[in-house]
Image: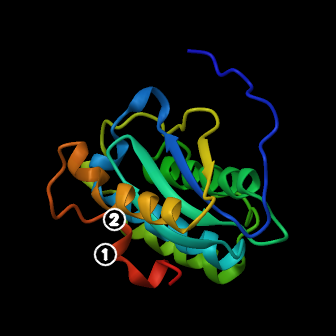
Amino acid sequence: LKYKNKGKRFYLDYMPYAITFVTENRYPYFKNEILCELFLLELEILTTIRKCKIFNFVALYDHIHLLIQSDKESDISKDMHYLKRHFSRNANILLQINPNIVGEDGHPRLILQKINQFIAKNMNNQSLKNIPKFKWQISFRDHYICNNYDFKNQMNYINTNHIKHNLPDDWQYVGYNYPNLLTN
């Protein structure tokens, strides 16, 4: 399925957006706990470096839902490009598909050290064997949040989406389990 350019995105400063992005061919990379944990680390980096506000998220086996607000200096497309690019690179290092980290690539030294420690700790984990190269589908779906009712609906949708996908009721990778990553 080829991506069809839907035109320019409509950006509103300081507005939250509901974002959905999907793994290539819907491969279930996030069945693996280590890749879920790496995603959490990348969300932390996104909020630190890009100054995004994350209101909620859920990591499902083959896609992510994210309720996010970009900083005034950025926009959703730039932030999603940053998140997807860095996560893909680091996931593939973990999968030993591209085991060399070249340069800091925009990460401050302390954050790069944190990523390197995570990778070193998990690189030889047997659960990562036989997983193909990590890739995201091109682009993402976005919906800007227009009012409080819309915001509450998106929060509820994200909070319960794992149940819709037949994951356990106590699925760990939902935003409410990580209050330190979320903006109140």
- Disc 1 to disc 2, C-alpha distance: 6 Å
Nearer to the camera, 26 or 162: 162
Name the side, left or right, on which 17 lies relative to 121. Answer: right
Compared to residue 55, the image places residue 7 above or below, namely: above
What x and y, as percent, mark residue 111? 62, 78
Q: How is the image coloured?
A: rainbow
CB contact under 8 Å: marks 1 and 2: yes
Choose top left, top right, bottom left or bottom right for residue 173: bottom left
Write the residue at 37% across / 77% down: 178
Name the side, left or right, on which 132 lies relative to 31. Answer: right
- Reading the image, the residue beneath label 1 is 177
Residue type at numbered disc 2: Val
Write the residue at 54% across / 74% down: 44
Name the side, left or right, on which 149 lies relative to 169. Answer: right
- Determine whether the residue tagged by mark 2 lies in a helix, strand or loop: loop
- Is residue 35 shown to the viewer in this render? no
Residue type at numbered disc 1: Asn
What x and y, as percent, mark residue 159? 32, 62
Write the residue at 60% across / 40% down: 140
- Reading the image, the residue beneath label 2 is 174
